[in-house]
């Protein structure tokens, strides 16, 4: 199965630096990971637990995540798919982890992904421009 990656960046005012929880929410919102429909912040909570286990170089199954967060497995899988579509979570043998073990590195990886996508877009645009000028 071919997986497409959706990279979303939302520019907002920087968060105040005295509230870690707010900074983490701002970080995820800036990457377009969380939305207003997620009333119980399930995706945010999944992101946080994956960040914590990444620091220990561990992976979790969807069942383990659901159990730790008291969420249904369906809710967890829905949000894991969204996080994988964004390119920040990877899956190996039905276990999940953040792509990297720290947020700075995550931003660096997203930036590389964006540069590749923009380079590809530029190449296709150049090809289309050439065909249109014939």
Image (spheres, rainbow, N blue to C red):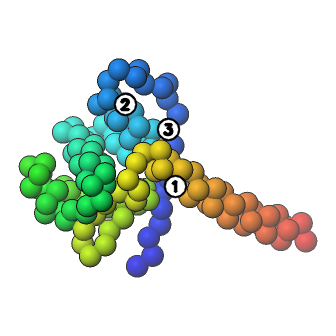
* Image position, residue 134 (x, y; %): 91, 71
Rendered residue at 8%/49% (across/down): 70
Q: Which residue is mark 3?
A: 10
Rounded to the nearest angstrom, the CA distance separating label 1 from label 3 is 17 Å
The mark that comes first in sequence, 2 or 3, is 3
Q: Which residue is mark 2?
A: 23
Rendered residue at 11%/51% (across/down): 68
Rounded to the nearest angstrom, the CA distance separating label 2 from label 3 is 14 Å
Q: Which residue is mark 1?
A: 109
Marker disc for residue 21: none
Front in this rendered view, residue 125 or 72: 72
Q: Quadrant of residue 100?
A: bottom left
Front in this rendered view, residue 61 or 58: 58
**Marks 1,2: beta carbons within 8 A:** no
In the picture, the quarter occupied by the N terminus is: bottom left
The mark that comes first in sequence, 1 or 2, is 2
Q: Is residue 30 rendered to the left or right of residue 25?
A: right
């Amino acid at each position: 199965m071919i997986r497409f990656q959706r990279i979303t960046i939302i520019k907002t005012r920087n968060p105040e630096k005295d509230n870690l929880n707010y900074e983490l929410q701002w970080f995820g919102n800036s990457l377009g990971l969380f939305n207003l429909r997620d009333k119980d912040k399930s995706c945010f909570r999944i992101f946080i637990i994956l960040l914590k286990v990444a620091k220990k170089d561990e992976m979790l199954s969807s069942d383990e995540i659901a159990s730790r967060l008291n969420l249904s497995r369906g809710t967890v899988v829905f949000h894991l798919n969204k996080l994988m579509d964004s390119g920040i979570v990877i899956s190996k043998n039905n276990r999940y982890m953040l792509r990297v073990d720290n947020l700075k590195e995550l931003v660096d990886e997203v930036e590389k992904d964006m540069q590749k996508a923009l380079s590809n877009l530029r190449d296709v645009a150049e090809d289309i421009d050439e065909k249109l000028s014939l």
